[in-house]
Amino acid sequence: MRLQARYQTLQNAVDSAYEDQIRGVISEDLFMRKRRLWESEMADVQNQLNGLKSATHSYQDEALKLLELAQVAYTQYLAAPMTKKADILRCTVSNFSFDGVSATPTHRKPFDILAEGSSLQDWQPLGESNPCLMAENHPS
C-alpha cells in the first residue's frame, strides 16, 4: 500500500537524520526542524490510513445490509401495497419499453447488474456445484 510505504519512508528519513545528527553531519537545529516536518507528515499519513480502515468496515457493513435486503426484497415487494411498489419501481427502473404484449424494464445502476445476473446460467454456466441441490432440483 502506498500510504504505508510513504509512512515507512518518512520514518527511515527521521532515523537516518538522527544518526547524521549524532555523528555531527547535521546540526541539532536542522535535525529538529526536519523531524517536526516529517513527523507532521507521518501523522497525516497515519490519519489517512485510519480513515481507510474505518471506511473498509463501513463498506463491509453496507454490503452486508444490501445482501440481507436483497434476500427478502422480492417477498417484501409482493406483500407491499401498490403505492410502495410504485416507489420501489421509481427507484430501481428508469424506463419501460413495450412490445405490444409485455413491458420490459430498463434498470438504473446498480440494479441493472442485479437484473442481468439473475439467471442461474449466467452465474453457473457449468451447472450446479452443490450436489445436494442437484439432487433436490432434479430428483431421479
Image (cartoon, rainbow, N blue to C red):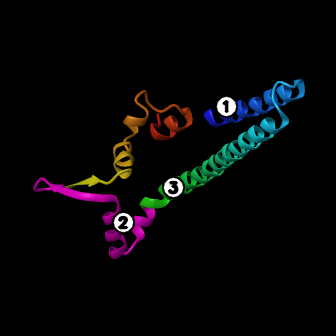
Amino acid type assigned to the residue bearing label 1 in the image: Ala
Q: Nearer the viewer, residue 51 or 23?
A: 23
Q: Which residues are magenta?
A: 75-101
For the point 47% across and 37% down, the residue is: 139
The stretch drawn in magenta includes residue 33: no
Marks 1 and 3, the one that precedes in the sequence = 1
Whether residue 65 is visible, yes or no, is yes
For the point 76% across and 41% down, the residue is: 33
Q: Residues within 10 Å of mark 2 (few under 14, many from 20)?
A: few
Amino acid type assigned to the residue bearing label 2 in the image: Ile
The stretch drawn in magenta includes residue 90: yes
Secondary structure under tag 1 reads helix
Of all residues, the one furthest to the left in this rendering is 100
Report the residue marked by disc 3.
66
Report the residue marked by disc 2.
88
Q: Residues within 10 Å of mark 1 (few under 14, many from 20)?
A: few
**Up-down relation of residue 66 to residue 133 (above or below):** below
Report the residue marked by disc 1.
5
Marks 2 and 1, the one that precedes in the sequence = 1
For the point 54% across and 32% down, the residue is: 131
